[in-house]
Image (cartoon, helix red, strand yellow):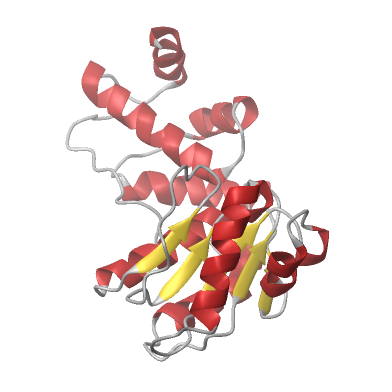
Amino acid sequence: MKQLTLDIGLTTGPTLDNFFAGPNLAALQHLQAWVGNPSRSPVPTYLWGPAGSGKTHLLQAARQALASDGARVGWLDAVSLETQPFDEAWVAVLLDDVHLYTAAQQHTAFTWFVQATAPVVGQPRPVLAAGLLPPADLRLREDLRTRLGWGHVFALQVLSEPQQRAVLRQAADERGIFLRDELMDYLLARFSRDLGHLTQLLDKIVRFAAQTKRPLSIPLVRAMLEDE
């Protein structure tokens, strides 16, 4: 029986609910409590781990959760070309991929960090940051590096292959599709196992299947790649 490719839904983005914790449950529970508490502690939190361990997912999920409550945050990542001054209306500062920051981005991150934790107006705000390396190994300006390491620090791990398969299965279920084992084998064998990349790839395959009115299959993925 052929798979239907109509009425396929795409997810709205990373959330804490759709984060497959695996060995990273402590970090997830910390952030669930963090976003759910309006009087959250100003003590900073730093997440570190290899690519594909879920750092950016968790930061974006925290940002989304706060935004859904009408809260504003400061966001800085390594691709931010322009930055803005610290805003007293922010409830938190989020810093992603700090290990890639340029000198100018490090200056902005440090300034935001100081103004968040020692504000001129209002209560201190927490800083949530993420990077590839533990704080002690970051090649950043010393005053920023030490601040990233003085609060809660969580080392994230990449999921095992069975756990990665479970995430892909869950992502497919959320999109209303059935992902056959042979197609999952193909994706895991030939593409980056970074879960963010894999879920984006899955969205792309789903859109291509809907556009071409073809079932999800290995030939479909090959045709999509040839069409690029």
Q: Measuring 59% from the left and 78% from the top, which residue is drawn there?
A: 44
Left or right: residue 38 compared with residue 6: right
Left or right: residue 173 compared with residue 105: left
Quadrant including the C terminus: top left
Residue 68 place in picture, x, y as percent: 26, 69
Left or right: residue 149 compared with residue 185: right
Relative to 184, residue 110 above or below: below
Evaluate whether residue 16 shows in this view.
no
Q: Measuring 34% from the left and 72% from the top, which residue is drawn there?
A: 66
Report the number of numbered marks. 0
Residue 198 place in picture, x, y as percent: 51, 38
Residue 110 place in picture, x, y as percent: 60, 66
Evaluate whether residue 143 shows in this view.
yes
Relative to 30, residue 133 above or below: above
Check the image and name the residue furthest to the front. 120
Nearest the eye: 161 or 113? 113
Residue 67 place in picture, x, y as percent: 30, 67
Relative to 40, residue 126 above or below: above
Displayed quadrant of residue 176: top left
Nearest the eye: 15 or 22? 15
Q: Measuring 53% from the left and 84% from the top, which residue is drawn there?
A: 118
Quadrant including the N terminus: top left
Check the image and name the residue furthest to the top. 226
Displayed quadrant of residue 21: bottom right
Check the image and name the residue furthest to the left. 7
Q: Measuring 23% from the left and 30% from the top, which residue is drawn there?
A: 4
